[in-house]
Amino acid sequence: MRLKIYQINKDRDELGLKFKPLKVIDKVDPKIYDKVFDAQADVETLEDAFILFNQAEKHPLFYGHSMSVSDVVVAGNEAFYCDSFGFQKIKFEESQANSKNFIKVLFVRPHEEPYVAQIPDTLEAKQQAVGGYIEYVYNSDETALVGDEEAKLKNKEGNRYLDGGGIIAGDFLVVGLGDEDCRSLTNDEVEKYLEKYSNAPDITPEETAADVGFNYISYM
């Protein structure tokens, strides 16, 4: 299920509404909310989402605190308030919430179909997405792959084959390249890389291990 999750930013919460049940709020004000998730989640219901986003191991594209009362979840064209008991349908103008620094990317995981997501355009967000220090693999069309530079040393699974030879391991992003940093992918770029990285290959651990570019030499 594709979800967007919004959480109250304490710095803009002048009335102290964070973590308050819906019955004590006159109106849900999107202006005090920040977007903290905009991606695919392996859930079928909002209750499943509550469980998922309260686990110790967070979804790699989730940039908020554990889901709690006062959070707003958008599924499809409907918004729901996370209340003391369950979820309540509400009106929520997403354009008024803060999501200015988010960019559209493609998220690619081993053995899975890639999907479009939006993440903050920050170093920390990219590192969290790939699970380590980031490394860029540049394409010829002003896009790049962003992966974990130590993925193979961490024995992460082989993900996709690279055009120039080699394997990229672990989760990675496809991003657009701007003048100074990353940018959102265009619709054409999204379609191109959705097609390119569909049908995930079966890359063996042996292949991935053999693709490491250097060897350790022990002097013990």
Image (spheres, rainbow, N blue to C red):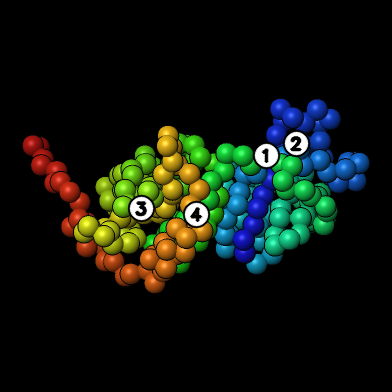
Q: Are marks 2 and 1 in contact (CB under 8 Å)?
A: no
Amino acid type, callout 4: Thr
- Measured Cα–Cα span from mark 1 to mark 3: 30 Å
Is residue 56 in view?
Answer: no
Question: Which mark sits nearer the N-terminus, 2 or 1?
Answer: 2
Q: Which residue is mark 3?
A: 141
Using the image, determine if residue 142 lies above or below residue 47. above
Amino acid type, callout 1: Asn
Q: Residue at x 37, y 48 (%)?
A: 142
Characterize the local packing of mark 3: few (<14), some (14-19) or many (20 or more) Cα atoms within 10 angstroms. few
Using the image, determine if residue 126 lies above or below residue 42. above
Where residue 189 sits, quadrant-wise, is bottom left
Which one is in front, 178 or 108?
A: 178
Q: Which residue is mark 1?
A: 98
User: Would residue 36 be found to the left or right of residue 33 on screen?
Assistant: left
Characterize the local packing of mark 4: few (<14), some (14-19) or many (20 or more) Cα atoms within 10 angstroms. some
Q: Residue furthest left?
A: 219
